[in-house]
Amino acid sequence: MGEFEAAGEIVTGGLLGRALEPRAGEGQSHAEHMCLNCGTALIGAHCHHCGQSGHVHRSLGAVGHEIVHGVFHFEGKFWRTLPLLAWRPGDLTRRYVAGERARFVSPMAIFLFSIFAMFAVFSFAGISAPSEISGLTAKPATAIEEARKDAEENRAEATRELRALAPDNPKRAKYEQRIATANHDLAELNEAAKHVSPDKVDQIVEVRTGWYTLDHGIEKWKKNPSLMLYKLQSSVYKFSWLLIPLSLPFLWLLFFWKRQYKLYDHAVFIIYSIAFMSLLFIVITLAAQLGVPSGWLGMAGVFIPFFHITRQLKQAYQLRWWSAVLRAIVLTWFIAIVLVLFLLILVAMGMTG
């Protein structure tokens, strides 16, 4: 089901982005003479009173057209924005802040699309929180017994499959290896069970702070860490917008004495930067699926973000290279702090929610 979930996330992100993105620069043919929304006489492709398009689709094919447009076009502005976002991010930031809006996708629209698309690709690639983590409250004897049952079931299944195969079937080696592995695991578990002292079986580390909400949250993490990690992963993209207000004070600190730059300017910088990083992670994930060596991908994941931030700082704030590099180094440390704060907030929400 990962492929369907990934497709759903991409479509959702595209439609959300399209809902936020104002239409501009595209005319409609076969327009009505009167606006069907407010009744104003039309003098162009769109109503000058309420802004509705003069041509209203009313066919099933138009629904599919809207979805495709929402995902791939953003009224055609996506393809004008993406090259600038990749190579001239500071120019894009400066031009958007200065008021050149009709040509480019707005920061929040491309932010939403990139975030949803990134987690869709992660889902497609099978990148998710581990689903099998033993809780910290599990007693040693109980944990060993559960592991023994899993190994026995695995051995029994492999044995059934092996018996159903012909003697000369090449697949027999795979099932024989599974049986051997299960036997080895069972032997180790039996040996481990001998060293579990009965007087230590019921000894469980209890953490009590006196604050009921925090204690209850710790208990949830101890009982079912897999579920809590899954909730944490789900919260990352749902609350990814928190990265914007968390980052804003740190970026402001780099330019607080330059009165010509407002908080809005910094916010646009942050949103476009996060959108690019999300798209970069998409490319790296897809490249990994295609077999690109992990060493190259690791270098790309380290150097491209720093280079991109440096270029965006230089172009957006019209800095010299040395000044942009120094600020990028400081901003990198700030980003680490922001990510830690972001994760702490999500963990706290999961523990108290």
Image (cartoon, helix red, strand yellow):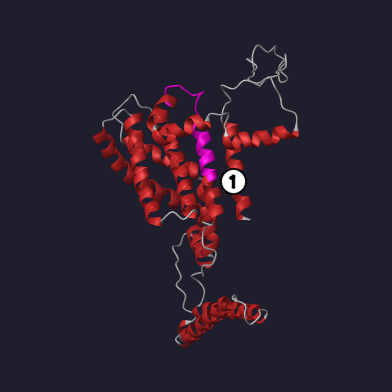
Residue at point 44%, 40% (across, down) = 276
Give coordinates of residue 177: x percent, y percent. Answer: 54, 79
Give coordinates of residue 173: x percent, y percent. Answer: 56, 78
Check the image and name the residue furthest to the left. Answer: 322
Per the image, is 320 magenta? no
Quadrant of the image containing the N terminus: bottom right
When the figure is inspected, residue 147 is found, relative to residue 85, above or below; the finding is below
Residue designated by label 1: 9
Residue at point 67%, 20% (across, down) = 29
Give coordinates of residue 157: x percent, y percent. Answer: 63, 77
Q: Amino acid at mark 1?
A: Glu
Give coordinates of residue 117: x percent, y percent. Answer: 54, 44
Check the image and name the residue furthest to the front. Answer: 168
Most foreground residue, 201 or 98 = 98
Most foreground residue, 309 or 254 = 309
Per the image, is 109 magenta? yes
Residue at point 57%, 23% (across, down) = 24
Q: How many marks?
A: 1
Tell me which segment is drawn in magenta: 97-117
Name the quadrant containing residue 253. Answer: top left
Left or right: 253 with respect to 175?
A: left
Q: Is residue 353 visible?
A: no
When the figure is inspected, residue 213 is found, relative to residue 120, above or below; the finding is below
Most foreground residue, 162 or 224 = 162
